[in-house]
Each structure stands twice: as C-alpha cells, then as structure tokens.
Image (tube, rainbow, N blue to C red):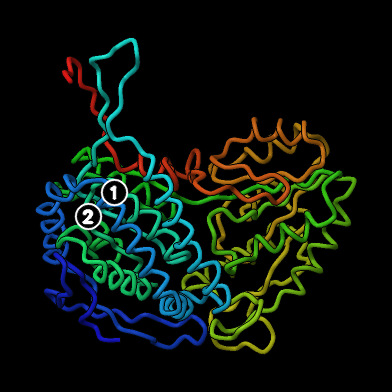
Amino acid sequence: MSNTKNFYINGQWVAPGIPNDFDVINPSNEEVCATISLGSEADTNAAVAAAKAAFPAWAAVPKSDKLDFLHAVLKEYNNRADDLAEAMSLEMGAPIDLSKTSQVGSGIWHISNFITAFKDFEFDRMLGDHAPNDRIFMEPIGVTALITPWNWPMNQVTLKCIPAMAVGCTMVLKPSEIAPLSSIVFSEIMDAVGLPAGVYNMVNGDGPGVGTQLSGHPDVDMVSFTGSTRAGALITKNAADTVKRVALELGGKGANIIYADADDKAVKRGVLHCMQNSGQSCNAPTRMLVERSVYDQAVETAAEVANSIKVGPADKEGRHIGPVVSELQYNKIQDMIQKGIDEGARLVAGGLGRPDGLNRGYYVRPTVFADVSNDMAIAQQEIFGPVLSIIPFDTEEQALEMANDTVYGLTNYVQTQDHAKANRAARVLRSGMVEINGTSRGAGAPFGGYKQSGNGREGGVWGLDDFLEVKSVSGWME
C-alpha cells in the first residue's frame, strides 16, 4: 500500500505534510503488510480547520438529506464488504470468516440501527404541556475528534462516525495506527457518497502524536475515545484545559456468574465468548464465577472447550481464532499468564508460548486458570487475550460481591434458570450492561460502562445523544 494515501482532509486525499513512515505488521506472520505515514501537527490542524469550516453548513442540512447520506453510506459499505473484511483480517488478525461476518457485520448492524433511530429522532421538542412557550433544541456539538481502537475497527468507527454525521457534527477520525487499513477503506466509502468537503476527515497517527493534538485542540468541541482506561484518563486530562466533552468507552473485566441451575451449555458458551476475537474484546466474560456444587464439572468442561479451540492464520478459512494484534500485546499476555502461574492459580488449559506448529506470528494458546481468587492480578487486570479465570463461590451474595469487586463495570453475565435470581443480579451488578443466559442485546441498545469502563453510551438514540448539546428556550412564539 502506498504511504501517501493516508490522509483524507477537506474532501480529498492529500499527502502528509512531513512524512513519518510507520510499518503495519501482519500479526499472522510478523511481516510488514503496509506502510503508512503518521500525521504531523500541521496535518492535524488542517483536518480540524476543515471540519470547523464545514460545520455551520452541515449542521443546517435538513434531516431528510442527512438520512439520504446515511442510506448511501450503508449501501456503499455493503459494496465494499469484502475489501473491509480483507483489510481487518490482514491488519489485526481476525480470521477471514469472522472478519466477513462479525467484524464487517458489526458496521452494517450499527449503520442500520442508527438509520432506524434517526428517522424518529426529534431535534425540536416541547418541554411539556405545562410550559407551552418552552422549547428544547437538540443541537450538534460541533467539531468532533473520534479516536478508535484496533480490536473491532469497523464496529467502533461506525459507532462514532455515523451518529456524529447524522446529527450534524463534523469530524476528524484517528484510527489505531496498528490497524489503519480498514479505516482507509471506510474513508473511500465516505468519499464515494459525496459528503460536503470537510464534514468527514481522517488522519493516521499515534496516541502521543495526533491523539494528543486532537484531544487538546481548542477548535475540537468533543472527543469520543475507545481504548484502554490508561489512555482514556490521559485524554481526559489533556482535554480539561479546553473544557470539551469527552466520551469514553474503556476496558472491562466482565464476570460471568454460573449458578448451579444454569443451562448445560452455559460453561461452553462462556468459554467460547471469552476466546472470541482471540480474547481481544473489552466486554469479554473473562472471569467465570461458578457455584461450588458445580465447580469441578465446570472446570473440566472449560478445559475441554479451550483445548478444542483451534488457532491459525487469519487468512485461513474456518472456525478458529487468529493471532493477537502485535508483539507488544503478545508479550503482555505471556507476562500475565506467567503471573497467574506465580500467584498459584491452577493452569488447566493452554499456558505459555505459542500453540504447537506455530513458530511465527503472535499466536496465544487458549488458556484457562482454575482456583483463582478474585484478588489475583489475572482476576483484576484486563489481559485482552484468550485467558479465562475461574473462581468458585458459595452464595448468591458472595457471587454478586465478587462480580462488583473490580475497577471496571462494562458487561456482566448471568446464567440461571431462576428468573427472580437473574433479575436480582441484573439490579445489583454495577455495570453498564448485563446479559442473561446468552441473550444478546437488542437492536439500538446502548453500549457503555460504569466506573473505569467509561462514561459514554454508544448505539441507538443514546449514540445520537452523545453528540448533541441541549438548548432550553423560553418565550418561544409560534
């Protein structure tokens, strides 16, 4: 791939101001698969200036016209589905079948759901019958900086770009420099639908460079960031001087509570969910809390399932997991596996090193630890790899207390056939999302967390609200 087609600014592809080459590594074989240029401060400033200049006119575009653009983006996204799948498989290691279905499909899902939410969204509302001359206006916040991660590229890009665009914001997208290729394809999609110049801009760069420049920029009105809690805290601090809105979707350490009366597929379902995308999901159920009367059987089942999971290259078809995204991530996961061993957890599947037959690429063995205590590092820290910790509990109260005993609060999971017990857990668990008995969230449901898992909500009407200011007007005359 050329190292010049990396910046989409003011409606056109431009060369970087000061080329700063960065190699994109294919995690399946550790070889360079593309070279991009990281943006300079001049590139960032140019993108922000373009977005600022385009904002007044774009904010005034009628809702019906914006809806037409959303439909056009969805159509073009579907047309480029194979290109997006190949890019994500290459850049971050998602097996090609997973990339074509879940990775690409997440973008189709979100664009479609935003279209549904946008159709009925009211930007001009009465306060209520008690105040007939009071109006509430929902207005676009302005120039938005959208900083996205590498693990689910199109999931996060569409969760940010589509609602920002829909409500009348302009934007500068900074995708992860580790996995930028799919965002270049997405920029081609946005170019193809004929958006006015400056509405959508994309600059490649890293966090300390372009990310820092965007989050502190005086002409950026809002930052929407998905990534690590550590990076989210730094972005918030950098944005504080300009008092801009910061929406964060951060890490997680989800508890999956398996009660004794859980269905017979609950443990298998939990292990496979934990290992999906090579464990690189913030909402993965990485702590399995199991009632003691069924604990031994759950450990045995979890080990069997993990040992049955195949690992292989991303370009290979089939149901397997691929590599993790980078050498840095691989080494971090290996260190955490070693820490689990050192802390005294019982290793029942996987372990250190690559799977047999794979001596090149960032492949991790699907790993399960049993007899974990909730204060161990592997139970408290986000590993972001295919590593599961199993923890026994004796009472319902103890399970809920352990589930909440974490700095994170993104997604928790409950497995029981007792509806009252499940509902009690859903009320008590301190997380932005709770999924019961393998039931996925419905179309338009909000995604986001409590505590150090962030403060924003993405998806559906909540995703639109994130990019809007609320204006109260009294004395309105018809």
Question: Residue 214: which numbered mark, if any?
Answer: 2
Query: Which mark sits nearer the N-terminus, 1 or 2?
Result: 2
The residue furthest top is 130
Q: Quadrant of residue 183?
A: bottom left
> Could you tell me residue 204's position as x and y percent?
26, 69
In what element is the residue under mark 1? strand
> Could you tell me residue 421's position as x and y percent?
77, 33
> Could you tell me residue 298's position as x and y percent?
83, 56
Residue at the spot 71% in from the left edge and 44% down from the top edge: 414
In what element is the residue under mark 2? helix
> Could you tell me residue 389's position as x and y percent?
70, 56
Regarding residue 326, the answer to whether it shows in the image is no
Task: State whether residue 322 is above or below residue 225.
Answer: below
Q: Residues within 10 Å of mark 2 (few under 14, many from 20)?
A: many
Task: State whether residue 403 is above or below residue 357.
Answer: above
Nearest to the observer: residue 295 or residue 148 = 148
